[in-house]
Image (cartoon, grey):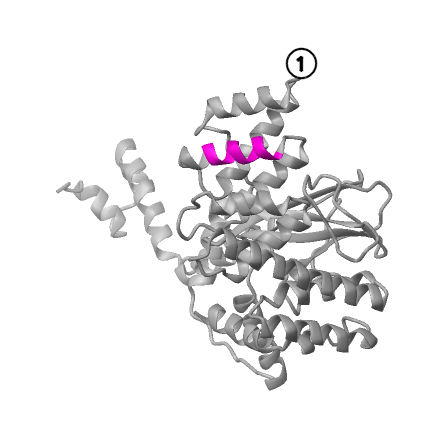
Amino acid sequence: MTVLDPRLQEALDGERDPASLPDGLREAYTRLTGVAELLREPPAVSVADRVMAQIRREASVPVVSPAGAARRLARWFARPRAVTLRLRPAWTLALAAALAAVVLVPFREGVTPGAEEGIAQFVGHFPGARSVEVVGSFNDWRRGALALRDEDNDGIWHGAVVLPAGQHEYMFVVDGERWVADPLAGRYVDDGFGAGRQNALLIVRP
Amino acid sequence: MKLLVALLLAAAPLAAQSPHARLEGRVPAAAMAGIDSLIEQAAAESLPTEPLLQKALEGGAKGIPVDRLVNGVRHGLVQLRDARAIVSRATPTRVALDGDLAAVAAALARGLDPRLVERLLAAAPPPGEPPGPVLHAAADLVAHGFPADSAAALLRTAQQEGLRGPRLLDVAVAASHELQREGGRTPAQALARVRAMMPNVPVATPPHPRAVTRRAGPGS
């Protein structure tokens, strides 16, 4: 512990004129009285005020850090919130029906044939055609059941479908009116209606 | 499971439809009585009715006039009778399935000689082996200009080499490829080449499943 010089102590106590102190003590007196003045003054801003000012400052500064934004987003998602749900029965039923349709209706693309099925691929060159469909014994000769596609408009229409293994007769119907036996079928069979017309014959392999 | 139930529910009414119901609205009303009669005859003779129904639907879709449409169905019935007669002679101990008769009828419709059909069927087909592939393979070979006897002999060799079902179609494809090779081959040379490569004839490659759609079935 530092012991004060008695003369300095007397000057601080007001019992001695500070001017009468030697130079070194007078300098020490001046510093100590300055510190005492500082301690005597109340703080200009309270601790609470400074904390709140800092919070306001942070809130007003735009977030530029991606990591900070991610943290804020994560906190937003993780924080529990009260949600008020108002349902209209009609919309709820429509939503349920849509979900059921998505679940129940099989995807039509990318299917895999079963053990007694095979893949039939159809390709036809019909430049300028507006539509080409395949009609045959596999779809009860029903129109509109299997349309071919020509995405790049090069006149080459194509499609592939899973069919039961075995033989199937078919025809292309071009633009909804012109019946054409698939020129690339390789197998043909008389259609039996007496005009010498032939159906294309398809043999699907399992 | 839900999908299966839904498909069964959807398929049940279709399967239960009578031939008459399936034809209504699809063929001219004036043709209905004649077609119904032919289908009833086929059923009474235990012949398959589906090929006749399909022929009627085909005629209706193509807009074939009524008389020719009914004649076409009648022609189909005659072919089925011929098919059963051929199958009975070729394999008397075997019960002819509907699919077998349809395959034989199709082979006849493709112009295959009935005697050749009978010979192919009688040539010791493996038990339970459907006749369709060997008949179509023979019809393919004949259509490409191979003599009928040579075609039948090649297919007989293929069966002896253990090739079955659709692999017989590969034999016909290989023979036609050999025939079309650059430089030219005679049918006899092409058949000899295929005979030499047996049983390792090339296998046809199926298309990629990603581009495939499932068929739209009857009633869709």
User: Which of these two is toward me, B104 or A164?
Assistant: B104
Along the viewing direction, whichever of B33 and A15 lies nearer the viewer:
B33
Decide if residue A177 is on the left or right side of residue B185: right
B72 over B132 or under it: above or below: below
Nearer-the-camera pick, A170 or A119: A170
Q: Amino acid at mark 1?
A: Gly
Which chain letter matches label 1? B
* Residue A81 located left or right of residue B52: left
Q: Is residue A87 magenta?
A: no
Quarter of the image that includes the N terminus of chain A: top left
- Determine which residue is flagged by label 1: B183
Q: Nearer the viewer, residue A185 or B81?
A: B81
**Residue displayed at 61% across by 35% down:** B148
Q: How many marks?
A: 1
Report x, y in % for residue A174: 82, 51
Q: Is residue B116 above or below residue A95?
A: above
Q: What residue is rendered at 59% in x and 85% in y?
A: A89
Magenta stretch in the rendered image: B148-157
Up-down relation of residue A1 to residue B145 (above or below): below
Is A31 displayed left or right of B21 in the figure? Answer: left
Residue A137 in the image, given as x and y percentages of width and height: 66, 59
Label 1: state its secondary structure: loop
Quarter of the view holding residue A107: bottom right
Query: Is most of the magenta stretch helix, strand or loop?
Result: helix
Left or right: residue A9 versus residue A174 is: left
The residue at 67%/61% (across/down) is B78
Residue A112 position in % (x across, y down): 51, 51
Check residue B149 for magenta coloring: yes
Q: Position of residue B54 (x, y in %)?
A: 68, 64
Q: For residue A49, which quarter of the picture?
A: bottom left
